[in-house]
Image: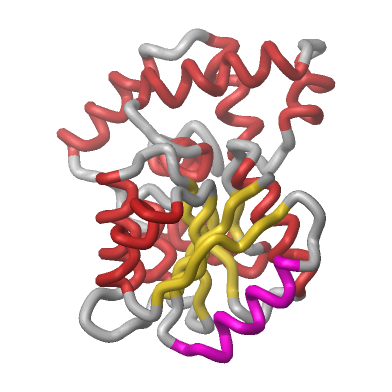
Amino acid sequence: MIRVALVDDEAMIRVGLRMVLSGEPGIEVVGEAADGAGAVDLVTSARPDVVLMDVRMPQVDGIEAARRVLAAHPEVKVIVLTTFDEDEHVAAALRAGVSGFLLKVSPPEQLIEAVRTVAAGHGLLDPAVTLRVIAAFAAAPSPSAPAAAADAALLAGLTPRERDVLRMLAEGLTNAEIAARLYLGEATVKTHLSRVLMKLGLRTRVQAVVFAYRSGLAGG
C-alpha cells in the first residue's frame, strides 16, 4: 500500500486529489496539511511514502516545506504540484531534492502514475516541464571554472558503464530501455544507477539528470 499525504492551502484541491487517489487500489491518503508549516508535523505523524506538495502557499512555500520534510525524513518522496511552470520553481524544486514535478492541470491518470512511479524509487518531470528544463540548461552560461572542475572530477569517478547509464537516463530512457540498449538485466541497471547517485552525492534520479546536463555528459 502506497501511503500519500496532501499539502495544499486550497481545500478544494485537497478534496479533488483525495477523490482521485482514494479510488485507486494500492493507494491510501493518510493525511492532509493546509500549509507548508504543517508539512513536517504531518509527515512525522502520518508516515507517508509520498507527499504531494503545492508550491505557492502562505508563510512557508512548498519548496521550503519540501526541504524541511526531506531533511527530517529523507526516505519520503515529494512530488511538487503547481499551476505555475516558471523555470525558477522547477530549478528550486530539483535543488530541494524532490522526486517529481507535475502541473496541477495534469490528467488524473498522470497523477496516479506519478505517485506509483515515485513510490517505486523513480523520478519524473511533467512532460511539459522536461523540455523547459532541457532548454534552460542549453541556454545557461557555462559554469564557473571551479564548478566545472568539480563536476568533471565527479564524472571521472564513474566507470564507463555508469556514465553510459547516466547518459541514457538523461535521454529519458526507462530502466528497461537502458537494459535493452546495453544488453543488461534491469537489476544490473538499478545497481549502476544506485552507485551513480552515491558517487555523485545525489538523492534522486531527477537530480542525476540535471547533473548529466550541467556536466555536459548529456545534451552536448
In-front residue for pair 146/175: 175
Q: Going 47% across and 54% down the picture, which residue do you hit?
A: 78
Q: Residue furthest front?
A: 45
Classify 160 as above or below 117.
above
Q: Residue 4 vs residue 64: left or right?
A: right
Q: Going 51% across and 59% down the picture, which residue do you hit?
A: 79
Q: Residue 16 vs residue 212: left or right?
A: right
Q: Going 71% across and 15% down the picture, which residue do you hit?
A: 187
In-front residue for pair 155/12: 12
Classify 215 as above or below 164.
below
Q: Residue 92 vs residue 7: left or right?
A: left
Instruction: Inspect the magenta stretch and tell me whether residue 83 lies in it.
Output: no
In which quadrant of the rendered view does residue 13 lie?
bottom right
Quarter of the image for the N terminus: give it: top right
Residue 3 x, y percent position in the rendering: 59, 52
Q: Going 77% across and 20% down the picture, which residue do you hit?
A: 179
Residue 200 x, y percent position in the rendering: 36, 25
Q: Residue 139 vs residue 27: left or right?
A: left
Residue 207 x, y percent position in the rendering: 44, 42
Q: Residue furthest left?
A: 146
In-front residue for pair 169/186: 186
Residue 76 x, y percent position in the rendering: 44, 45
Q: Which residues are magenta?
A: 10-22
Main SS, magenta residues: helix
In which quadrant of the rendered view does residue 64 lie?
bottom left
